[in-house]
Image (cartoon, helix red, strand yellow):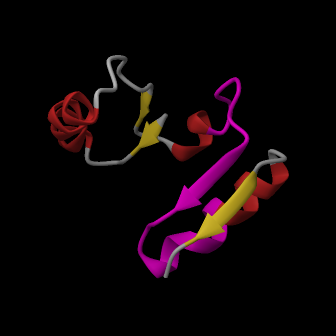
Amino acid sequence: AVCDVAEFRFAALKPLLDKLGQGSKPDTYADYRKLLDHKGLDAVVIATPDHHHRDQLLAAMAAGKHAYCEK
């Protein structure tokens, strides 16, 4: 699954996934809180501007997900 508030970026994923041989399209979300409800999601990578890290990390931990934050 992929989450981004700029939904136009989702269109750029298809050529990249096709190049990698990944046939299925990932579920996409514009709201990270809805992403955390995704079934089968065990971990998240948080690669957002610094001022968003805190809220997203706390929400991921509250949802019981493993999290990695990039700075």
User: Going by the picture, which residue comes out furthest to the top?
Assistant: 24
Task: Give the residue displayed 32% in from the left and 18% down from the top.
Answer: 23
Q: Position of residue 60 (x, y in %)?
A: 72, 53
Q: Which residues are magenta?
A: 36-56
Side of 31 relative to 13 (left or right): right
45 relative to 2, above or below:
below
Q: Does 50 lie within the magenta span?
A: yes
Task: Give the residue displayed 73% in from the left and 41% down from the top.
Answer: 42
Task: Give the residue displayed 64% in from the left and 28% down from the top.
Answer: 38
Quadrant in the picture for residue 29: top left
11 relative to 70, above or below:
above
Task: Give the residue displayed 44% in from the left and 67% down from the top.
Answer: 48
Q: Position of residue 21 (x, y in %)?
A: 29, 27
Q: Position of residue 13 (x, y in %)?
A: 24, 37
Q: Position of residue 1 (x, y in %)?
A: 49, 34
How many numbered dots are placed on residues in this image?
0
Taking depth in this image into account, of 51 and 40 the one nearest to the observer is: 40
Quadrant in the picture for residue 18: top left
Quadrant in the picture for residue 41: top right
Q: Does 28 lie within the magenta span?
A: no
User: Going by the picture, which residue comes out furthest to the front?
Assistant: 21
Taking depth in this image into account, of 67 and 19 the one nearest to the observer is: 19
Side of 71 relative to 40 (left or right): left
Side of 65 relative to 29 (left or right): right
